[in-house]
Amino acid sequence: MSDTGRQSATDKAGAALKPDSEKSYLEQAGDAIKGKADSAASTAQPQSQKSYGQGAIDAISGNKNDNQESLMDKAKGALGVEK
C-alpha cells in the first residue's frame, strides 16, 4: 500500500527489475518522471506522517528525507557494482 501521490512497492520493483535495454523510450521517460515525482512527494512528506509500509519502501529505495544512501546502493557499493 502506498501513501497518496506515491508509487507502490510493486510499481517501483517492476520498473527496477526490467532492464532499460528492454524498455521503449516512452517507458524509460515514464519511469524517470514517476521516479522524480515520487522522490519529490517523499521529500515533501515528513517521516512522521508516512505509513509504516511507505517508510519501509523509502528506506530500501533511499527515498528518505535525510538523503541517506539506500540499502540497495550500499549493497551495490559493497559488491563493486556501479550505481
Image: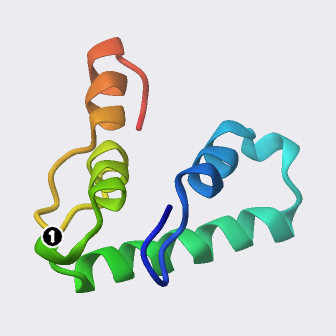
Residue 26, position as x, y percentages in the image: 84, 71
| Residue at figure coordinates x 42%, y 31% from the top left | 82
Residue 5, position as x, y percentages in the image: 49, 83
| Residue at figure coordinates x 35%, y 54% from the top left | 53
Q: Nearer the viewer, residue 20 or 72?
A: 72
Left or right: where does residue 57 sit relative to residue 45? right
| Residue at figure coordinates x 37%, y 82% from the top left | 41
| Residue at figure coordinates x 72%, y 71% from the top left | 29
| Residue count near mark 1 (Cα–Cα under 10 Å), binned few <14, some 14–19, many ≥20 | some
Left or right: where does residue 38 sit relative to residue 69? right
- Quarter of the rendering containing residue 80: top left
Q: Nearer the viewer, residue 2 or 65?
A: 2
Left or right: where does residue 5 sit relative to residue 26? left
Task: Say above or below: 61 vs 77.
Answer: below
Residue under numbered circle 1: 47
Q: Secondary structure at mark 1?
A: helix
What is the total number of numbered labels drawn onto the structure image? 1
The quadrant in which the C terminus is found is top left
Residue 51, position as x, y percentages in the image: 29, 66
Q: What is the three-letter code of the residue carrying label 1?
A: Gln
Residue 27, position as x, y percentages in the image: 80, 64
